[in-house]
Image (cartoon, helix red, strand yellow):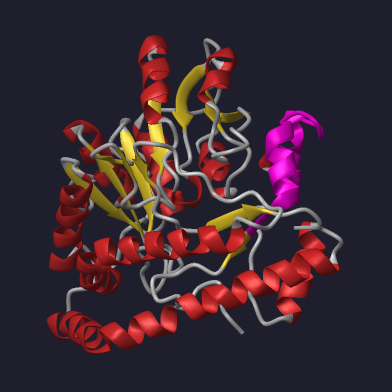
Amino acid sequence: MIPILDLKEQYRNLREQMRSAVEGVFESGIFINGPNVKALESEIAAYVGAEHGIGLNSGTDALHLALRALDIGPGDEVITTPFTFVATTEAIGIVGATPVFVDVDPHTYNIDPAQIEAAITPRTRAIIPVHLYGQPAPMEEIAAIARKHGVAIVEDCAQSIGAKIGDRFTGTFGQFGAFSFFPSKNLGAYGDAGMLVTNDAALAARVRSLRGHGGRVKYYHEELGVNSRLDEVQAAILRVKLPHLETWIDRRRQAAARYEPLLAPLRIQLPVQTPGTRHVYHQYTVRVPERDAVQEHLRGAGVQTMIYYPVPLHLQAVHAALNLREGSFPHSESLARDVLSLPMYPELSAADQQTVASALESALAACGVAA
């Protein structure tokens, strides 16, 4: 089986460094808010070009606590895309706000800025653009709209660490950039982990308070917070990996470039890289006719694929109260029917990619999709 992601080879390449880093934490006896957490916060902030990094226990909490720090809550609206993972709207719901959906560009799969302004109301407090699959959303246009209407931006960078628009990294265009270090991410921990970056010292201080039970001084609590600390073991693991991230991004981009001539003759839509951006290919996602049947044929041929995501958020039961129906966001709905993510990771070989392409061609033919 050619896996969609192989973390075992990455570990084998870093085994000794990983073991040394983790043993160092065990020897220190410091497991919460220790030197590795503080160093990683500085290193991630420096990498993306932000002033502050705040380690958290997940990317979901990064989104949630960004909204809390911005005092967004009941009665407020937050604009986002329906074609993303539920964590994006989960964070909105946790603070008591209401998600307002805007459809995506069917070519980039990211939120369509041309539709954002029409969705803004007097209750709009923030926009959460999602850099889906590692492709930067059009942040210059989104930032201009946000400035015009005086609303905040929280970038969902769960899949986009290292992605750029020009020379500027995703996560630095708004009040906050929210990152996930879930194990499958381009920079992944060995458990849950996340981080916020910001250039606003006051917002950074507020998040640090919120993540530690709502207090700036131990045992003195100013507001209801949460327990959302990035632990020292995960920080040590991420510090081993971070120096390799640029190499891994280069290898992902090389793999994407190898896929293109192999797949271009097939009747599918390949990923689009917006000019002037750096796509980091967290996923290599194509649009495929007869997607479900094609996926089943690929599974039988020994090629693992994934669907991100089969049901857009406005049609999920969790958002039934919004009273949105099929047809509300046609591009997102069409993508949910068609998208298929192929194997993509830094160690993916050219030979395996050739196998994937051949298997996909055979699967399409078996499903009646002519080249």
Region in magenta: 314-340
Does residue 13 appear to the left or right of 301 in the view shown? left
Tell me if I can see residue 213 in this picture: no
Q: Is residue 83 above or below residue 18?
A: above
Residue 341 as seen in the image, left or right of residue 127: right
Name the image quarter holding residue 370. bottom right
Farthest residue to the right: give it. Answer: 368
User: Could you tell me which residue is drawn at 84 percent across and 69 percent down?
Assistant: 366
- Closest to the observer, 142 or 303: 303
Q: Quadrant of residue 37?
A: bottom left
Q: Residue 142, image x and y in percent?
A: 42, 24
Left or right: residue 101 compared with residue 365: left
Query: Going 69% across and 44% down the picture, which residue do you hit?
Result: 335
Magenta span: chief secondary structure: helix
User: x, y percentage for residue 260?
Assistant: 52, 58
Total labels drawn: 0
Q: Is residue 290 above or below residue 216?
A: below
The image shows residue 316, relative to residue 240, as above or below, that is above
Left or right: residue 108 compared with residue 154: right
Residue 316, image x, y percentages: 73, 45
- Is residue 317 shown in magenta? yes
Residue at the location (58% across, 13% down)?
118
